[in-house]
Image (spheres, helix red, strand yellow):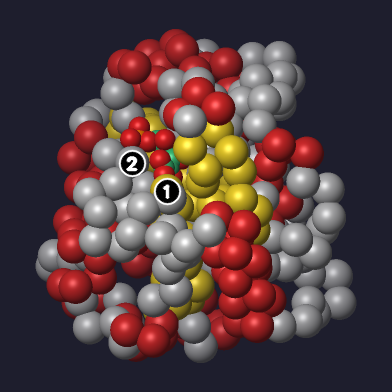
Amino acid sequence: MDLIKVFPSHEALAQAVAEDIAACAQDAIARRGRFAIALSGGSTPAPLFDALASPPFRDRIAWDRVYVFWCDERSVPPDHPDSNYGQARARLLDRVPIPPAQIHRMQGELDPHAAADAYDRLLHGFFGAAAPGEPQPRFDYVHLGIGADGHTASLFPGTEALAAADPDRWVVANFVPKLHTWRITLTAAAINAGRRVVFMVEGAGKAHTLAAVVQGPPRPDDLPAQRIRPVAGRLVWMVDEAAAARLALD
Ligand code: 6PG
């Protein structure tokens, strides 16, 4: 079974995920000299970003060794309120000493195919050739949420990105009919190459979906979050008690 950690409140969850990121960053920097993290959007990470931008986490992380990427982006410019980059920038990146050249956003203001192509090239340039036996792109940490419909990143139920089969294609444009919009997203295979992949889930509104994704029968087209299975990494679910309400826990 996956590792599931339950916390009593959204605040406690945010502190615990911040601690998890800080510890992973320290370890990655000690071993490999850098920490590459892919962030997500939505409302769940807001208190996490605030925690990372505040003591003690702000001062524990060697921000000059941190490289920030995104799991997905909406089709909006970076200063739009819906921009995943914009949220992370306002709540976290503008408040910590990270070199701007180490922040790599998806360009939501461009044609989504062009933006996906550009980000795919950027990731190939950053990660380079795979070491023998190592999957790529080898993010040290992939931070994910889930939607009540079972999506993660911008891998929505029944959408074309779920069929992305080229292992060398890590980023795709994905049309989401129910939102009448394009998204830019990492593929499931790209996420599954990460060393540590952490879902952060909070609130009673996610309880049913969380139980279906983690403990229900396989329905990977309806519940794309079930496609997340790191091939050589660790999958961790960090959730609050409200979200965990329908899980069968030991
Ligand atoms: C996005 C995300 C998305 C998010 C979930 C959960 O751009 O919307 O990256 O996958 O993680 O939709 O969002 P909430 O935290 O708002 O429920």
Tell me how far mark 1 sits from mark 2, CA to CA: 11 Å
Q: Is residue 89 visible?
A: yes
Packing grade of label 1 (10 A; few <14, some 14-19, many >=20) is many
Q: Is residue 21 left or right of residue 70?
A: left
Q: Is residue 243 left or right of residue 194?
A: left
Q: Secondary structure at mark 2?
A: loop
Q: Residue at x 71, y 37 (%)?
A: 160
Q: Are marks 1 and 2 in contact (CB under 8 Å)?
A: no
Q: Residue at x 35, y 66 (%)?
A: 22
Q: Which residue is mark 1?
A: 74
Q: Residue at x 22, y 40 (%)?
A: 12
Up the image or down, 149 lies above or below 108; here it is above
Q: Is residue 194 visible?
A: no
Whether label 2 lies within 8 Å of ligand 1 gets the answer yes
Q: Residue at x 27, y 39 (%)?
A: 43
Give residue 74's position: percent from left, percent from top: 42, 48
Give residue 187's position: percent from left, percent from top: 67, 50
Whether label 1 lies within 8 Å of ligand 1 gets the answer yes
Q: Which residue is mark 2?
A: 42
Packing grade of label 2 (10 A; few <14, some 14-19, many >=20) is some
Specify the amino acid type for callout 1: Arg
